[in-house]
Image: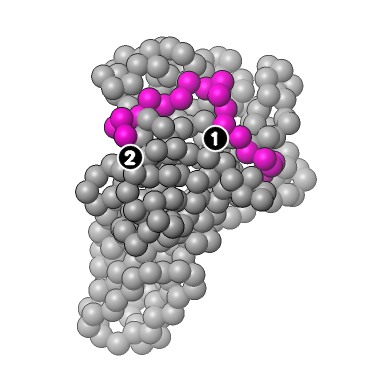
Amino acid sequence: MGLDHPGLAICTGPKYQYPYFTDGIHLTAGGYDRLGEKYGEVYTHAVVLGEAWQPLQPASATASGNVISVRFQVLVAPFVWDDGIVPPQGVPAVWASGRGFEVTLPSGPETIASVAITGAALDTVEITCADTIEGAYASVAYAFTGASRITQTLQPDGYTYLNTTYRWGQLRDSDPFVGPLTGVPQPNYAVAFSVIIPLRGPPSVLKVGGALTSDQSVVRVTLLTHMLLMTMIPLTLDTTWNCAEMIIVGSNGGGEITDSGPVTSVHLNE
């Protein structure tokens, strides 16, 4: 929502880095204290000072051979691996070396050999895979797949929780903010995400207009992201959607399609 409505909705970041209660769902009292401090920091920057705020999130994702490069929008450089957090053990095991990153091909989960922080600005993570990724229909994700107690026994705070799922990663920036109540450092951790490769820039915006003037027209919209979503929606002139890839099937004929950004697959079938 923060990407679709910048300035109106603000994502402060994830909360997997905070301590959880034994149910694995709620934070501890100290965890909520730290979460509230982060809210206060973001509110100060975004509302009081009027500064642009964005979480630690991907700006682009490309592949060359068997290496995926994910460049991030870094708030306070450089970003680093937080070795104080227990590394995810991998669900499935082929992601065990991913430090929270996940790669999926049409054939299934792809083996991650290693991950490394690179780039002149230290704002990019290079993910080395076992197989060639370039040219394949692949997705890269982070802290996206939950682990059950059967396959994951340790959580980031060292506890084992029952009857729950949990997901996290070790990537954070170097924000020097320290919570005034807890006295605990509060760097920004990477958000959970899943994107199709290649991802270049922010999500695309597609507009459908021109001859499609009837506000009763109906189109079928298929969003091709990590998961397939199909929906029937009423179409009005100058309707917009944000997505990585879109297929539109129109039913009233005609229509003019204009797009901005890298919409990779758009078809209008009368």
Decide which of 11, 100 is in the foreground and name it: 100
The numbered mark at residue 196 is none
Residue 112 rendering spot, x and y as whole percentages: 38, 39
Which range is magenta? 74-94
Residue 93 rendering spot, x and y as whole percentages: 31, 30
Q: In this rendering, does residue 222 appear at all?
A: yes
Identify the residue at horizontal 47%, vertical 55% (top origin). Answer: 61
Decide which of 2, 175 is in the foreground and name it: 175
**Residue type pointed to by label 2:** Thr
Decide which of 68, 231 is in the foreground and name it: 68
Q: Which residue is mark 1?
A: 171
203 lies above or below 159: below
Q: Kindly report the distance in space between the C-alpha atoms of the residues bearing marks 2 and 1.
A: 19 Å
Residue 51 rendering spot, x and y as whole percentages: 73, 49
Horizontally, is 114 left or right of 185 in the view? left
Horizontally, is 40 left or right of 219 in the view? right
**Residue type pointed to by label 1:** Leu
Q: Which residue is mark 2?
A: 111
Residue 231 rendering spot, x and y as whole percentages: 26, 60
Give the secondary structure at mark 1: strand
- In magenta stretch: residue 87: yes
Q: Main secondary structure of the magenta part?
A: loop
State which quadrant residue 108 falls in.
top left
- Determine crowd level at label 1: few under 14, some 14-19, many 20+ residues with C-alpha closer than 10 A: many
